[in-house]
Amino acid sequence: MQQYEHRYCPHCATMLAPIVQMEDGGPKERMRCPACGYAHWNNPTPVLAAIVEVDGRVLLARNAAWPAKMFALITGFMEAGESPEEGIAREVKEETNLDVLSCSIVGAYEFLRMNQVIIAYHVVANGEVRLSPELADYRFYELDQLKCWPAGTGYALADWLRTRGHEPVFFTAEENAERRRGLD
Ligand SMILES: [Zn+2]
C-alpha cells in the first residue's frame, strides 16, 4: 500500500508548499496552499483490525500480496457514515463471509510507518469461510498455538491473549524475518 503524496491544493489546485504558521502548539511547518491557506494536516488514517474467533479458535488470514508464511488479522479502512463496530463487522463479512455476533474493543495501536492508527477489536463470528479475492489463504489457530508479531496488530493480539489467560509468545527475530521475507 502506497501513501499518496499530496502536491496540489484540493480546493484551488495551486501547488502546496512547506509554509510555517502559528498553530496551538507553536510555529509549525506543513504543506499548505499559498493561494487559499488550505493546510494538508496529514492526520493518521484509522484502520480497523479484527481478532476473529470462531468456535474458540482464531482465524488469521494471508493477504494475496503477502509472503507465503505471513498470516495476520483481518483489517480494513472505515467507510464514511459507519461506526467502528459497523465497519469491523462489514470488513469481516466482506473478507471472510463470516457473520459477526459480538464485538469488543482490544485497544488502539500506532502504525507510524503507514501514518495509520489501528483500532483493534475482538469479534466472535460464525458461518462458512469464503475469502474475498484480496485474501489468499486462512488458518484457524488454537489460542496456545498463536504467535504474535512485533507490530501494531501483533501487539493487539498479544494484549487480547493476556485477557484470555495466555501469556503471548512472540516470533523470534529470525522467525519474524522468515515470515516477512519478500515483504521488506
Ligand atoms: Zn488552495
Image (cartoon, helix red, strand yellow):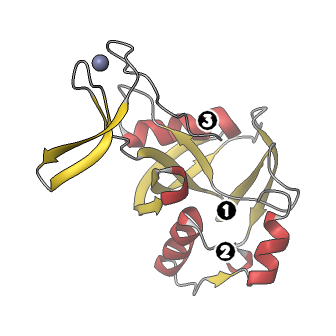
Structural distance between the alpha carbons of marks 1 and 2: 7 Å
- Residue bearing the label numbered 3: 93
Side of 136 relative to 167 (left or right) = right
Side of 8 relative to 140 (left or right) = left
Q: Position of residue 60 (x, y in %)?
A: 71, 57
Give the secondary structure at mark 1. Answer: strand
What residue type is disc 3 on?
A: Lys
- Residue bearing the label numbered 2: 143
Q: Which quadrant holds residue 150?
A: bottom right
Q: Which quadrant holds residue 145?
A: bottom right
Side of 22 relative to 122 (left or right) = left
Which one is nearer the viewer's eye here, 175 or 60? Answer: 175
Identify the residue at image location x=72%, y=72%: 142
Which one is nearer the viewer's eye here, 135 or 161? Answer: 135
Q: Quadrant of the C terminus?
A: bottom right
How many residues crowd mark 2 within 10 Å: few (<14), some (14–19), many (20+)?
some
